[in-house]
Amino acid sequence: MNTVLITGSSAGIGKATAKHFQEKGWNVVATMRTPEKETELTELENVLVAKLDVLDLDSIKSAFETAIERFGKIDVVVNNAGYGAYGPLEAFPRENIVRQFDTNVIGLLDVTREALPRFRQNNSGILINISSIGGKLTFPLGALYHGTKFAVEGISEALNYELNQIGAKAKIVEPGAIETDFAGRSFDFKNDESMTEYQTITSNLMSSFGEILENASPASLVAEVIYEAATDGTDTIRYLAGEDAKAMLANRQQVSDEEYLAGTKAMFKL
């Protein structure tokens, strides 16, 4: 039986993915920062709920060791843990900037570095990094979030060269808007109203989120795409998740940088 380890499994895409793989007959290592609060996944057969905080190296190492002890090996690792920081860059304290990159980029790299020796030993393995359509195009006030997702895109693509040497693959899943609590617990918004020059763009962005989320897909759809990436046996690197993601990327590929920026400014009434 194959085994998948998933970070950020307490809610949203991570939890939906854990449930989907379990339904497909996989062993699942559902990791999260506070496993003691989890009640649903702990009731499922062949699911191990384990503590893993991507900012804590000891917890990463321990989660992998516990997974190997329980299931023997890990076939797929899904780097899903992350959140979005939005707002004027000038309004962000440096510690929040560091936390955004530590979580979405450095944490992903630390989990990956823990997975690689296992993949090399097994001469197989699939690494699936959850990026975003925001790793291919940008919205206003997303310098930090988009910066991390653009980084995930480059890291994942480049890793394929070296993973191929050990019989493994790196893949990227790029969701559009998803019906999760991203705008709540996974959203770090900063603003300083004394910086009056930024208030129009801030107000317009926040008022547009409702419209963007109207076209959101369920987290279960992303889980299905992640499962496809893990099991389709192809060398495909990128997988879009959501009709909105497909439409936005198609539009971005058809226009110049200048046209895209002008269109986005018009959308947000800037």
Image (cartoon, grey):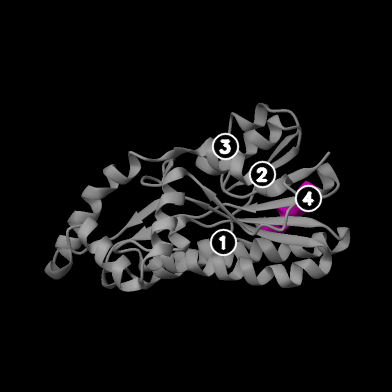
Nearest to the observer: residue 100 or residue 239: 239
Point out the tag, 3 or 2, that comes first from the N-terminus. Answer: 3
Point out the tag, 3 or 4, that comes first from the N-terminus. Answer: 3
- The residue that disc 4 covers is 75
Looking at the image, is 158 positioned above or below residue 149?
below
Looking at the image, is 105 positioned above or below residue 268?
below
Looking at the image, is 219 positioned above or below residue 43?
below
| Residue 80: x %, y % from top left | 57, 52
Nearest to the observer: residue 177 or residue 184: 177
- The residue that disc 2 covers is 228
Judged by depth in the image, the label closer to the viewer, 2 or 4, is 2
Three-letter code, disc 3: Ala
SS at circle 1: loop
Which label number is shown at residue 55?
1
Labels in figure, total:
4
Point out the tag, 1 or 3, that comes first from the N-terminus. Answer: 3
Three-letter code, disc 2: Glu
Residue at horizontal 55%, vertical 43%? 222
First to last magenta residue range: 60-67
Q: Quadrant of residue 56?
A: bottom right
Three-letter code, disc 4: Asp
